[in-house]
Amino acid sequence: MTKISGQAQSFVPKEPLEVQIVESYSAADRNDLAGGEKDPSQTSAYQLQWRPTEKHVLVVEGRKRVCHLGLVRQTVEVQGNLVSVAGIGGVLARRECRGRGYCRIAMEAAEAFALSQMAVNFILLFCRPALQSFYGHLGWARVLSPVWVSRSRGMSCSPCFDGQVFGCGAVAGRGSSFTFAYLVACPVFWF
């Protein structure tokens, strides 16, 4: 487990904050963080299958987990070249903790970890249109080109997040077409 100390800028936490990078995050952990919400990401209607994440960034206040996001290493094709990326998915903060900077802390820790420990060229995530401004505020750049995904039915343009891909770091794909080289729908890059 990797520990990183952090503190949200927009409020004063009641207890010290800690960022942990861990290997596992169970369905029970997710349910606890979601407060019993069945679809906190509001993406179940798309009926996509997502690849499980490999690393988990947790923001902990005192002894209580207040935010999570997952990371997965993935290979994508950009203009015919295979590129290693980290995908961010499953961003979730407790309902009563939203708007306090926890997701920003988790995103910054995930970016630092992915770029330094996962041997990737850049980082991607998919998000719903309602979240574009949030990620834009964090410095992510929107990729306007089509995003193609490999699914069990073959290649198709991303069915629900077309144009909603953000990149951080060396955004090699800006203005070019992304093709995700994996056998199920856009593995995990969703929100």
Image (spheres, rainbow, N blue to C red):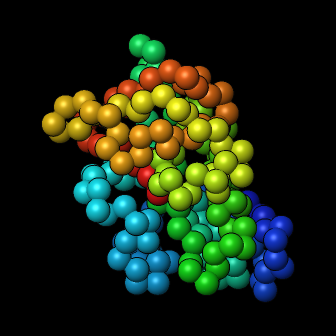
Using the image as rendered, state which of residue 110 and residue 139 is in the foreground: 139
- In the displayed structure, does residue 67 sit left or right of residue 70? right
Q: Quick one: quadrant of the N terminus?
A: bottom right
In the picture as drawn, the residue positioned furthest to the top comes out as 80
| Residue at point 53%, 59% (across, down) | 130
Q: Position of residue 177 (x, y in %)?
A: 45, 23
Could you say which quadrant of the image residue 102 lies in?
bottom right
Residue found 50% across the figure and 53% down from its top: 129
Give the image location of residue 112, x and y in percent.
69, 45
Q: Is residue 34 above or below residue 2?
A: below
Determine whether, in the image, residue 111 is placed left or right of residue 184. right
Residue 76 appears in the figure = no
Q: Is residue 33 above or below residue 166?
A: below
Residue at image position (82%, 76%) is: 11
Q: Residue furthest left?
A: 153
Tally of numbered discs? 0
Residue 33, horizontal then vertical, whole percent: 50, 78
- Percent from the top left, x then y, of residue 165? 51, 40
| Horizontal arrangement in the rendering, residue 87 relative to residue 113 (left or right) | left
Compared with residue 89, is residue 38 higher up or lower down, i.e. above or below?
below
Please state which of residues 56 and 141 is positioned toward the viewer in this rendering: 141
Q: Residue at x 61, y 84 (%)?
A: 96
State which quadrant residue 44 falls in: bottom left
User: Quick check: can you spot residue 95?
Assistant: yes
